[in-house]
Image (cartoon, rainbow, N blue to C red):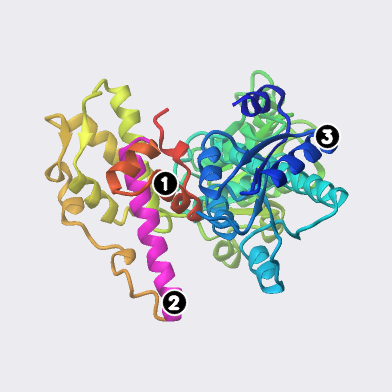
Amino acid sequence: MTELTAHAAEDKKLVMIVDDEPDMLAMLRLTLEKKCGCLVVTAPSGLKALELLGECSPDAVITDIKMPDLDGLQLLQRIQAYDHTMSVIVMTGYGTIDMAVQAIKDGAYDFLQKPFDKDHIVRVVRNCLERTTLLRANRNLKDKLERLAPPAGFVGQSKAQKRVLDLLARVADTDATVLIRGESGTGKELAARALHDLSNRRAQRMIVVNCPALPENVLESELFGYSRGAFTGAAHAKKGLFLEAHGSTILLDEIADIPVQVQTKLLRVLQEKEIQPLGQNRTIKVDVRVVASTNQNLEEKIKNGEFRADLFYRLNVVSVVMPNLREMVEDVPLLVHHFLALFKREYERPELEIAPEALRLLYRRPWPGNVRELENTIKRLVLSAAGGRIEAEDLEPAAAAGPSLPGDELFTDLDALSYNEAKAEVLRRFSEEYLSNLLARHQGNVTSAAAHCGLERQALQRIMRRYGIISVDFKQR
């Protein structure tokens, strides 16, 4: 069709007119082409209009209601299911208020009663086209944002992880001090690196300090540096880690273990943005973004006099709490496949697969060591698996026994909800787990996944959109 070719080539707005009266089609076509400068495609029936939707994507549809095969309201509903950004104008010579109300409720942009003024329909169509442009631009922007790769190392679609990633993204490009808290193995250093990589300091290397690994006297000199002769053995001056991190980010890992004397000097850095190397009287200004992490209860350590309250308040400007794996259990299958693909490449075992029963047992395991424990388990399985498939018996007894998770008792935590709320929650849990496993097996191929589960591709995509599941997250990288 020449109209569709021109639409693609010139990127002009395309309007579809649907009416079983040839004179009305001709009049509207001439008016819109002349006064709106758009391309027009016509359809003599509702069914023909549906056929044309597969060949083009009109920006607006103007449809009559009274048609022999498929009336305008039915066509409106089909168009809304096909593409909700496509604006539809309904017109009729037999209009009633009830009919107009129903059309607007079904998603029509406007309702016009014949005969109508040509200038009026031109205004309505222009507004209609503007609406479609805005809706599609917004949809495209959302699609682009959804396809942006998450920070390196983050895998999963659970709400708990999405909340953390959203907070990291919002505070990354600021100089706010961040305290990252969470159990061992939850990825606190990963979060710190994400903050750095998303900030305007990313061009420089992030400095990581493992605080418990250094004795008190060594930690102080490592952080702030020293001048020659500052103490016995100081044969030459040393540049401290805060100076090395100038213009970058410093991560103070497991900050709860810093001695109180060092805490006092660290407080000065946060307050005054300056350091004083050992053996020097002068201070040095530093531009450093401080990120700290801990798996300990700092409030309890403050009560016991082991941690300064004023330092805590300086560190806790923004608090990021990393979820444990029990809070993001629906991400376990994704993490399993992610680590499996990673270690298959590393140890050159491309043929290796994981049996569904083994995956189920890994899903049911409580994982007290969180993601780190899961990663090490998959690494061991890849190294030790004898055949081409990881079976349930390859798992250690604790995993094979399958200790139950709180989520295994599907209904026990729903007593406080109403029937409808509980039903919706159970459906959400099932859908997110089922679709995540399905797409992981099919490596993000929606067509293949739909064929496997017996759904139409569009139906599967609608369910995915409802639960915020994105196919690109399951594709192998």
Q: Which mark is residue 34?
A: 3
The quarter of the image holding the N terminus is: top right
Residue position for label 2: 420
Question: How many circles with numbers are drawn on the protein?
Answer: 3
How far apart are labels 2 and 3 at the CA level? 53 Å
Residue 100: x, y in percent? 69, 67
Residue position for label 1: 185
Q: Is residue 459 above or below residue 209?
A: below
Query: Dot 2: within a 10 Å radius of its alpha carbon, few (fewer than 14), some, or many (20 or more) residues?
Result: few
Q: Is residue 86 above or below residue 222?
A: below
Q: Looking at the picture, which amino acid does disc 1 mark?
A: Gly
Residue 344: x, y in percent? 28, 27
Q: Looking at the picture, which amino acid does disc 2 mark?
A: Asn
Q: Residue at x 27, y 41 (%)?
A: 377
Residue 369 at least partly seen: no
- Mark toward the start of the polypeptide (2 vs 3): 3
- Mark toward the start of the polypeptide (1 vs 2): 1
Q: Nearer the viewer's eye, disc 1 or disc 3? A: 3
- Segment tinted magenta in the rendering: 417-443
Q: Secondary structure at mark 1?
A: loop
Q: Residue at x 85, y 38 (%)?
A: 35
How far apart are labels 1 and 3 at the CA level? 66 Å
Residue 161: x, y in percent? 50, 50
Contact flag, marks 1 and 3 (Cβ < 8 Å):
no
Magenta span includes 411: no
Q: Looking at the picture, which amino acid does disc 3 mark?
A: Lys
